[in-house]
Image: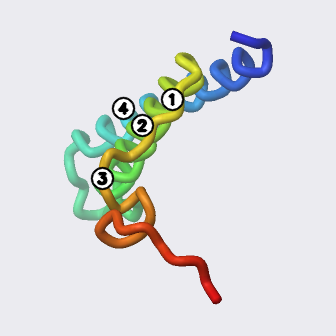
Amino acid sequence: MNPDNQLELIITLALLVIEIGTIAFCSYRLRQPVNPAKPRIFPYNGAIMFLVLGVILTAAHTYSVYTGHRLEARNKMNRGGMGGAPQQPMR
């Protein structure tokens, strides 16, 4: 692993830790009893949903940086357009 990848791996892991910590904080805030006098303004459930998506993407990026292999889709949509048919060049 070259030094550029090491720095990228450290930054990616730091982002992963921040995302997991933010999920833990949002989960903690959701478990607090509801106070009718102070309604919750921030949607913690929605934040957790987007943060979990971020964790999945960051984990995939961490894997690709660590191993040096790109993750590629296995569906046919990624291989030349709709249904896997090769696209014709534009005229």
Front-lying residue, 26 or 89: 89
* Residue on which disc 2 sits: 55
| Among numbered discs 3 and 1, the one appearing first in the sequence | 1
* Residue on which disc 4 sits: 24
* Residue on which disc 3 sits: 75
What numbered label is drawn on residue 16? 1
Q: How busy is the neighbourhood of tag 1: few (under 14 within 10 Å), some, or many (20 plus)?
A: many
In the rendered image, which quarter contains the C terminus? bottom right
Observer-side mark, 4 or 2, equals 2
Label 2 secondary element: helix
Residue at the image point whose x is 79% and y is 13% from the top: 3
Q: CA distance from mark 4 to mark 3?
A: 34 Å
Residue at the image point whose x is 71% and y is 20% from the top: 5
In the rendered image, which quarter contains the N terminus? top right
Can I make out residue 70 in this image?
A: yes
| Among numbered discs 4 and 3, the one appearing first in the sequence | 4
Observer-side mark, 2 or 3, equals 3
| Among numbered discs 1 and 4, the one appearing first in the sequence | 1
